[in-house]
Amino acid sequence: MTAGCFTDGAQKPLILVIDDDEANLQLLERLLRKADMEALTARDGKTGIALAHQRLPNLILLDIFMPGDNGFDLLRHIRADANLKQVPVVIFSVLESPESRKKAFDLGARDYIGKPFDMKEIIIHIRKVLGLKC
């Protein structure tokens, strides 16, 4: 991973990670910071949506299986929200079925990553969706 990608004064991308698994949140937060991105984390959809409204992330990394609203419900909400509908959403989930992938893309996801995920791969996916060259 390229460190110092945004040392020219450009603002680091803000990535909101919504996942109920604390270990995943901590791992992804460290991984994103190491990749020169700012991480914001939420353990549930309600908190995640509130944080998205407060900080307007550049990308939302969203798990599907969570208590309360699942990732598909949250994706519907994000796409219907005038302030958030343009924020790219990348799903990451243990659901690997073609039906789950199709549903995610039909609801407006920009990418889909299976769990367990490769740490380098997830950064590559995020950079691709954001159009980053470094």
Image: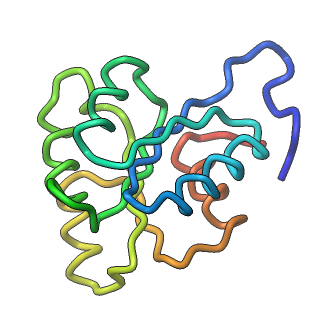
Q: Quadrant of residue 91?
A: bottom left
Q: How is the rendered protein coloured?
A: rainbow
Q: Residue at the location (67% across, 46% down)?
A: 32
Q: Quadrant of residue 99?
A: bottom left
Q: Residue at the location (46% across, 39% down)?
A: 16
95 shown above or below 68: below
Relative placement, left or right, of 74 versus 31 is left
Relative placement, left or right, of 118 versus 54 is right
Q: Quadrant of residue 52?
A: top left
Query: Hey, which residue is sitting farthest bottom in the picture?
Result: 97
Query: Hey, which residue is sitting farthest front in the picture?
Result: 22
Q: How many marks?
A: 0
Q: Residue at the location (68% across, 36% down)?
A: 37
Can you give x and y, in whole percent of width and height, for residue 90 in the image?
41, 54
Relative placement, left or right, of 108 versus 13 is left
Can you give x and y, in whole percent of width and height, for residue 108 in the image?
24, 51
Query: Hey, which residue is sitting farthest top in the picture?
Result: 9
Looking at the picture, tell me which residue is in the foreground, 60 or 50. 50
Position of the C terminus by quadrant: top right
Can you give x and y, in whole percent of width and height, for residue 41 in the image?
48, 41
Q: Residue at the location (37% across, 54% down)?
A: 62
